[in-house]
Amino acid sequence: MKNGFKLMLILSFSFLLILSPANAGRTTEYNPSLPKVVILTTGGTVSMKYNPASGGAVSAVSGKDLIAAVPGLDKIANIETVDFCNIYSSQMTPDIWRNLSAKVQEILERSDVQGVIVTHGTDTMAEGAFFLETTLQSEKPVVFVGAMRTGSDLSPDGPANIYNAVLQVCSPQAKVWGVTVTMNQFINRARHVRKDETTNVQTFNSGEHGYLGYIVEGQVIPFNNVLIKKKLPLPDYFPDVPLITTYAGDDGKFIRYAVDRGVKGLLIEGVGAGNVNKNVFRAIKYALSKKVPVVVASRVRHGGLYPLYGDEGGGSSLINMGAYLAGDLSPCKARLLLMIALAQLDMTSEKLKIIFTP
Ligand code: ASP
């Protein structure tokens, strides 16, 4: 079968799953002395198995199958599963995350539910978790979890990751953490987590912000509770906000082109602590003159952005001109935040400034 056709089939099947109400179910024998945890599945490697016909990993596993592969869950919680979709996370979109956020919100509002676990592909898990962190209006715990190895690999990591996620939702510590990405025993804030390894199970970290905690031998060990949570209402739509990277000798043409095409905001991936060259600076000035808000992030993975330099293109000159720096957010997360912010009817430049100040 041609790859494009196969992808179409997978996607159509996935969207059928999104629409179908019949994909929810209780998966462990009800025990009234245990909390209730809902596991909502969206796909990714954790739901995949090797398929010799396609020569790669393909979506194969439902929520119920996933839970069946994790012995001992019935000793810690009553588990309910919801099959939300079953897609590679490279196919995730802001629209799907918005529907996911609305679904998780609906589940969290149930008084019998202690918290939600979202299984998700790791490729875009950090952004998905950040989207929910920003738009969920609930303090109950939500744990994003996945796997780097499929169910047919020699030692799959999915079952232990799911077990730990359930432990975390049931633990008193998790109450203050909001949305986390918890994999390979490490607990990361949605805001700071990044995927840092393409194939290794120790792929997620939070850089200089550190882990929130660690799960070992059935215990959730908190390391710190320093949280930055900025909530915004779930948007009705997503304004067009491209993410444009820059490079040595960049003449700013892509920025000017995007502005002339009518984009509603721009996320620029600059260098260092939030700097661009003078041609990019002038292109950003052009964007601002056309009332297109601009946020500058950095290609540097850790350390945050600061207005340190005053040359034409330095962070300080960008701020003085009316651009914003992404602070401690990665370019992709800053773009999501700008889209969510610009979709709010009452957004002003003052409010944007507060939103992009960590
Ligand atoms: N390609 C997979 C995905 O993000 C990778 C994973 O889940 O680890 O869907």
Image (cartoon, rainbow, N blue to C red):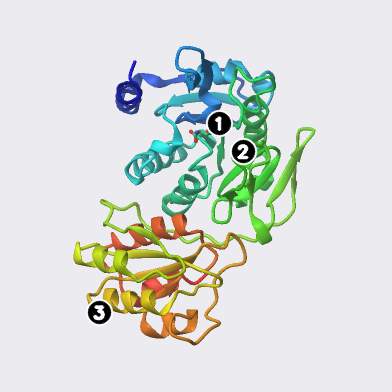
In-image side of 346 versus 160 (left or right): left
Report, in whole angstroms, how far the alpha carbon at label 3 lies from the one at label 1. 50 Å
Report, in whole angstroms, how far the alpha carbon at label 2 lies from the one at label 3. 48 Å
Looking at the image, is mark 2 or mark 3 nearer the viewer? 3
Estimate the x, y position of residue 183 in percent, counting from the top left.
Answer: 64, 38
User: Pointer 1: residues within 10 angstroms few (<14), some, or many (20+)?
Assistant: many
Estimate the x, y position of residue 83 in percent, counting from the top left.
Answer: 43, 25
Estimate the x, y position of residue 174 in percent, counting from the top left.
Answer: 64, 45
The quadrant in which the N terminus is found is: top left
Looking at the image, is mark 3 or mark 1 nearer the viewer? 3
Nearer to us in this view, 217 or 87: 87
Dot 2 falls on a residue whose secondary structure is helix
Report, in whole angstroms, how far the alpha carbon at label 2 lies from the one at label 1. 7 Å
In-image side of 273 versus 215 (left or right): left
Report the amino acid beneath label 1.
Val
Report the amino acid beneath label 3.
Ser
The residue that label 3 is drawn on is: 289
The residue that label 1 is drawn on is: 37
Instruction: Please name the residue shown 43% across and 81% down the image.
Output: 319
Instruction: Please name the residue shown 60% across and 17% down the image.
Output: 152
Mark 2 or mark 3: whose residue is earlier in sequence? 2
In-image side of 182 versus 9 (left or right): right
User: Pointer 2: residues within 10 angstroms few (<14), some, or many (20+)?
Assistant: many
Mark 2 or mark 1: whose residue is earlier in sequence? 1
Dot 3 falls on a residue whose secondary structure is helix
Instruction: Please name the residue shown 42% across and 74% down the image.
Output: 324
Report the amino acid beneath label 2.
Val
Could you tell me if the residues under marks 2 and 1 are in contact, i.e. CB atoms within 8 Å?
yes
The residue that label 2 is drawn on is: 169
Residue 279: image quadrant is bottom left
